[in-house]
Amino acid sequence: MSSPVVGIVGAGAVGQTVATTLVTAGLPERLLVVSRQPTQVQGLCADLQDLAQTARSGCLVEAGEVADLHGCDAVVIALRTDFTNTAAERDIRRGGAAANAPALGMLGRELRGYSGTVLVVTNPVDLMARRFADVSGCSRVFGIGSNLDSARYRFLLARYAQVPPEQVRGHVIGEHGDRAVVCASTTTVGSRPITVPVRTLVADLQQRPALIRNGIGRTRCGPAGAVLSTLRKALGLVDGIEELSVPYGDVYLGIPLHFTGGKAVPALPPLTLCERLCLDSAAGSLRDAYAQLPVLSERIAT
């Protein structure tokens, strides 16, 4: 696919950063920005058009409607409803579940029959990816979350081992957040096994989002990079592995997927008993949380 068309839903802080990253990279030939806030989307499109010209990316940026997304090769969902996150230190990503679930459901209803690739960025990403997939019936729905966790893990471990990050091979799976599972048993550095300081790295992984939030208010750039990397593989532009939230039994959670020509095949590494139990625990927690999501409303906010 040489000239893909990508749609993005949501023109807030995360949506803006994702759109900026895609335009700068010149990945889509055409980027369609969708939001129910017309002034915001018009302003963002104008700014992105200026970026496309100054960066010479060749990307055509336009405002669109939800119905226009059916003509896109991929859709990125970065919407966020207006709510106050009351979650304190634990499960902070789940704080928006009740507010965002109806919006994802309404969007899924409007995109029933869509045959392209959907990347869900909206938190709590594992629950929102499942809600959108359940309502829309779309078969290629991926949640961005474990992808970012894995990238952070490899970066932090590389710093600990004092090697370049590209020498580290390892995955973080399960739920994006406090129940993420580090696959320490199959992690390698320079193709060799390494004794991973799991407790230290898990603590660092859990503290990193707070570090970002306290500094700039919201995580933006990491998810945007994860979207760009995943789109390249999901659209068949390159092959490789991404950790994404997909069906795992009756829940959605993050596992490695190997993309070849745009087709994804699960590539879950061998797990120790402890890692398997942690993954099953995350699945159980997600199952319970999904059962508590509110039913669809008649309103969608992007």
Image (spheres, helix red, strand yellow):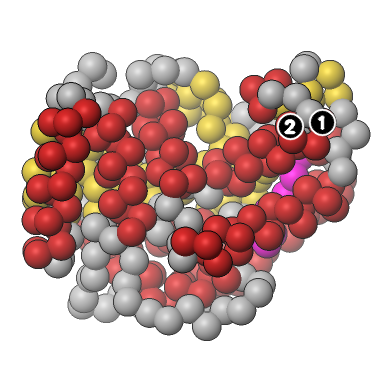
Q: In the rendered view, does 227 fall on the left or right side of 186?
A: left
Which residue occupies 28% across, 52% down? 16
Q: In the rendered view, does 69 fall on the left or right side of 260?
A: left
Q: Amino acid at mark 1?
A: Ala
Residue 96 seen in render: yes
- To which residue does mark 2 refer? 158
Above or below 147: residue 131: below
Magenta extent: 177-183
Front-lying residue, 151 or 177 = 151
Residue 204 screen position, x and y as percent: 73, 53
SS label for mark 1: helix
The disc placed on residue 104 is none
The answer to whether mark 1 and mark 2 are in CB contact below 8 A is yes
- To which residue does mark 1 refer? 161
Quadrant of residue 157 within the rendered picture:
top right
Q: Amino acid at mark 2?
A: Ala
Residue 256 screen position, x and y as percent: 60, 35
Which residue occupies 63% across, 42% down? 152
Q: In the rendered view of the protein, which quadrant contains the N terminus? A: top left
Residue 110 screen position, x and y as percent: 19, 59
Quadrant of residue 207 within the rendered picture:
bottom right
Above or below 45: residue 195: above
Above or below 197: residue 65: below
Between the C-alphas of marks 1 and 2, the distance is 5 Å
Q: 10 Å neighbourhood of mark 2: few (<14), some, or many (≥20)?
A: some
Task: Based on the picture, tell me whether residue 36 belongs to the magenta stretch.
Answer: no
